Image (tube, coloured by chain):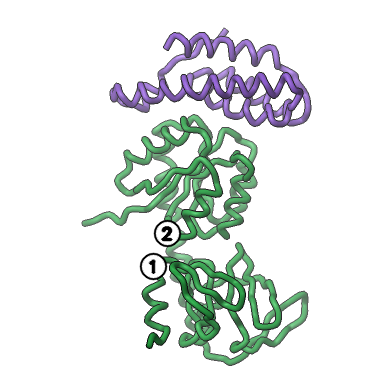
Chain colours: A green, B purple
Amino acid sequence: MTIKMKKCIIIDDELMSRTVMTELISTKPELLLVGDFPDAIEALKYLNHNEVDLIFLDIHLPNFNGFDFINTINQTINVILVTSDKNFAIEAFEYNCIVDYLVKPITPERFDKAMTRLKEFEGNQKKKKTSQTKEDDIESSNASEFYINNSKRLIKIDVNTILYFRANGDYVFIKTESNSYTIHNTLRKIENKLPKDSFFKVHRSYIINTKKIVDIEDNSVLIGKDVIPISRRNKSELMKRVHLL
Amino acid sequence: MEQPNIEYFEKLSNNNVSFKQKLIDIVKYEFPLELSDYESLIKNDKLKEASEIVHKLKHKIGVLGMTNSYVLAETFEHSLRDGGTENQAEFESVLVTVKVFIDQL
């Protein structure tokens, strides 16, 4: 039986911490360290073009708080916080993507415990995903228009005018030809309500209207005036959908 | 006065001599830089920035097994963040102890 390895990265400005974490990760056959970053900006650049399953993240980063980082990536990747500060534990558990909270210096025993928690956490996520998919399948439709709840007003949107959707934590940003809206919803729920022939999830945080593509370049697509990232995993599927002469 | 040790490094390296040496080399490299940053920031009365460095020094104190000094560093870090300098003398005497220990490694 082969183990599916979880790709992980470390973000910590202290060399000592990164070295200790690298060693602890190397003892776990289920983990594959694909990068370590002393600053958050470099990590963000990496995440724009690479899929990662788990982040070991320091809270105190130069010019960038760990929680700001989690908000920037829209809570789409599981995170284990690694910090010398115990004071953020309560705030940490307000985030659905935070698996555990490790206080430095980390012992091998505490790291083992975090791995057990990760397994449980992923198991719960899987169960949640299965029930969510069933719910979404029931709701699935090919409507040409739908209504969104925006500041207590129901606004009708013609599906053909939508350019793209962007996930933002518990919210979704919708960009149309003439307007933009932010609604409380998830990308997964919305994806199942959209016509499959014209909408495609190009990235974990983006669904685009393929009829509105201006051009495609490397790992990004231009929709209107906005550049949207394409994950490597979804690029070949997107290329199948466009009609190449 | 609590004394530093390298038990944590020994535990982590699990008899891997080169890895233990790597950890020692890192602490010998990072600690003087952080100490120098701390001294400069304190001298210039930049207390909030100094608290960020104390945060890093606290980790070094922790990996060197100084549990009581770790708590002291944490208190001092919070005090600096709030614009105070309580426990500064005690904290700095811990830094001296660590420096002497690291220089002998």
Count of picture labels:
2
Q: Are marks 1 and 2 on the same chain?
A: yes
> For mark 2, what is the residue?
A51
Looking at the picture, does residue A36 appear above or below residue A212?
above
Q: Quadrant of the N terminus of chain A?
A: bottom left
Looking at the picture, does residue B34 appear above or below residue A11?
above
Q: Is residue B67 left or right of residue A150?
A: left
Residue type (three-letter) at the residue carrying disc 2: Glu
- Pointer 1 chain: A
Residue at image location 75% in from the left, 19% down from the top: B86
Q: What secondary structure is found at the residue carrying circle 2?
A: loop
Labels 1 and 2: the sequence-earlier one: 2
Residue at image location 64% in from the left, 75% down from the top: A174
Q: Which residue lies most toward the left here?
A: A1
Q: Which residue lies most toward the front here?
A: A245
- Pointer 2 chain: A
